Amino acid sequence: MTTKLISIYFLLTSYNIKHADIVLAQVVLECGWQVDSKNVIERNNILGYCSNMEFKSIEACIFQVSIWQRKYYYGGDYYEFLECIYKGSKGDCKRYAADQNYINKLKQIHSRLFPNS
C-alpha cells in the first residue's frame, strides 16, 4: 500500500467512515493505485462524486463521504448497500455505480489492499 493510500485510510478512519477499508478500495477503483487521477489532482475528488464536483481538500471530500453515509447507510453488508442504496419509486434499486462489475472489482482491490482480512 502506498504512503498516499495509508494517509487516506487514516483520514477515512479519523472521520469515522464506516467500512473505511471498502471505501479505500473505492478510492483505488475511482482514482488508481497512485491516487493521481484528474479528479484528484484538479478537484480533490477521491471518489468521483458527480465527476466534476470540486472540494477544497481531500479532507473535505472525506467529510462529504461521512455526510453521505449518515444519509443513506443504516448498517449491514456494505457491498449489498452499494448494490442497492435505496429503492426508487418503482421499487428499483439505485446503485452506487452503473458498472455491473463494480462490486467484484471492489472485492478484488480490497483483497490486494488487505490480504489478511
Image (cartoon, grey):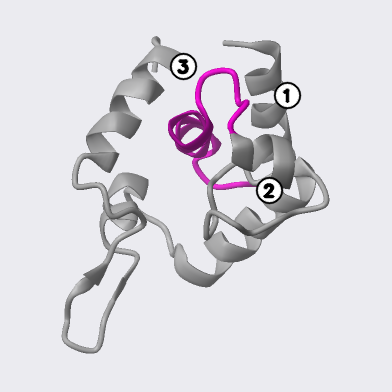
Could you say which disc has been placed on residue 7 in the image? 1
Q: Magenta span covers which residues?
A: 16-37
- Name the image quarter holding residue 73: bottom left
Look at the image and say whether residue 25 sits in the magenta stretch: yes
Residue tagged 3: 113
Residue 21 percent coordinates (x, y): 50, 31
Task: Give the image location of residue 14, x and y in percent.
Answer: 74, 39
Crowding at label 3, few (<14), some or many (≥20) Cα neighbours within 10 Å? some
**Rendered position, 89 above or below 11:** below
Is the residue under label 2 in contact with that under label 1 (CB below 8 Å)? no
Question: Residue 99, relative to residue 31: is it above or below?
Answer: below
Relative image position of residue 3 (x, y in whole percent): 70, 13
| Quadrant location of the C terminus in the rendered image | top left
Going by the image, does 27 lie left or right of 38? left
- The mark found on residue 62 in the picture is 2
Q: CA distance from mark 1 to mark 2?
A: 12 Å
Is disc 2 placed on a helix, strand or loop? helix
Using the image, tell me which numbered label, if any, was put on residue 109.
none
Q: Position of residue 113 (x, y in %)?
A: 46, 16
Amino acid type assigned to the residue bearing label 1 in the image: Ser
